[in-house]
Amino acid sequence: MIPAVIAALFLLPPMGFAIATLVICVLAAWEWGQLAGFVTRFQRIGLALLCGLLLGAMLLLSSANLMTAHLPAIEFSLWASLGWWIIALLLVLSYPVSASFWRDSKLLRLVFGLLTIVPFFWGMVVLRSWHYETEQYAGAIWLLYVMCLVWGADSGAYMFGKMFGKHKLAPKVSPGKTWEGVVGGLVTSAIISLLFSRWVDFDVTPTILLICSVVAVLASVLGDLTESMFKREAGIKDSSHLIPGHGGILDRIDSLTAAIPVFSCLMLLVFSTI
């Protein structure tokens, strides 16, 4: 699917890219319905439609100013994402004890889904729209950079974990992940960051780029673990079967749902560097 993603990044204008991302988020919301405890098709379709209407309304209200992350709704979404993933880290670290607080609450699990999907949507949109009027592909390059970091971290973690993995990262959530895999993912991402920095003038200090990149990669690991935690509680292996042989949309974007908004928040709001 990577060629299709890259094509969408560089060929679609910001609004077209936002609509494509909205469709992905609607499908992700449909899958999240199962994680939230909505078992009937009607309930899950209703949840997906409500998510689409929410994102569509927010998009229409802010379409004239897509270039900035400082619109109230977008800024709130990105800050909320930062807070949510800190909470998610605590939930994962204390699992399965933490599940006793949310496993019987559909409302809480629904809120967790909104805090995952809505900021992901806005992180994708604001990064792609960055300085579009003056430099058409600047935002696309930033977004591609974060995606490559995450893809590299996933691949590096898999290879290093298979070869050297001995110490389990979170055995009660995802027994297959190891600390050696995390280190391998970070090393792979560091190489990708170095290569990008040689080819692209990011106009950001190396220290800030390093901080944001490392945090984004660690967030991507957390995103993967968090979805695994919710799937374990729901008693399912894949979020759906929308992608034959690869599971569902959430299974493909779980790492990005954390990495993209966290990176956007750090770059655009915390450090205000881009």
Image: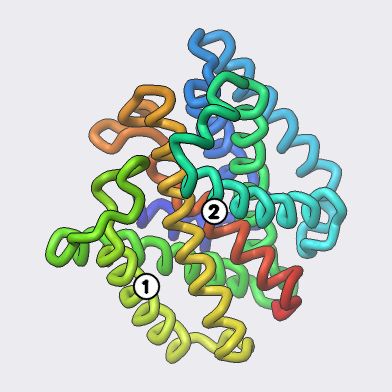
Q: What kind of colouring is applied to the model shown?
A: rainbow
Q: What is the x, y in percent for residue 80? A: 72, 50
Q: In this view of the protein, can residue 20 be seen by the observer?
A: yes
Q: Quadrant of residue 189?
A: bottom left
Above or below, 244 relative to 59: above
Q: What is the x, y in percent for residue 99? A: 51, 31
Amino acid type of the residue that numbered disc 2 sits on in the rendered structure? Ala
Q: What is the x, y in percent for residue 198? A: 43, 91
> On the rendered structure, is 141 left or right of 53?
left
Amino acid type of the residue that numbered disc 1 sits on in the rendered structure? Leu
- Which residue does the image show at 27% across and 58% down from the upper left? 178
- Which residue does the image show at 71% across and 55% down from the upper left? 78
The one of 226 and 140 positioned closer to us in this rendering: 226
**Label 1: few (<14), some or many (≥20) within 10 Å?**
many
Above or below, 55 relative to 5: above
**Label 2: few (<14), some or many (≥20) within 10 Å?**
many
The residue identified by callout 1 is: 186
- Which residue does the image show at 49% across and 44% down from the upper left? 94
The residue identified by callout 2 is: 258
- Which residue does the image show at 54% across and 15% down from the upper left? 38
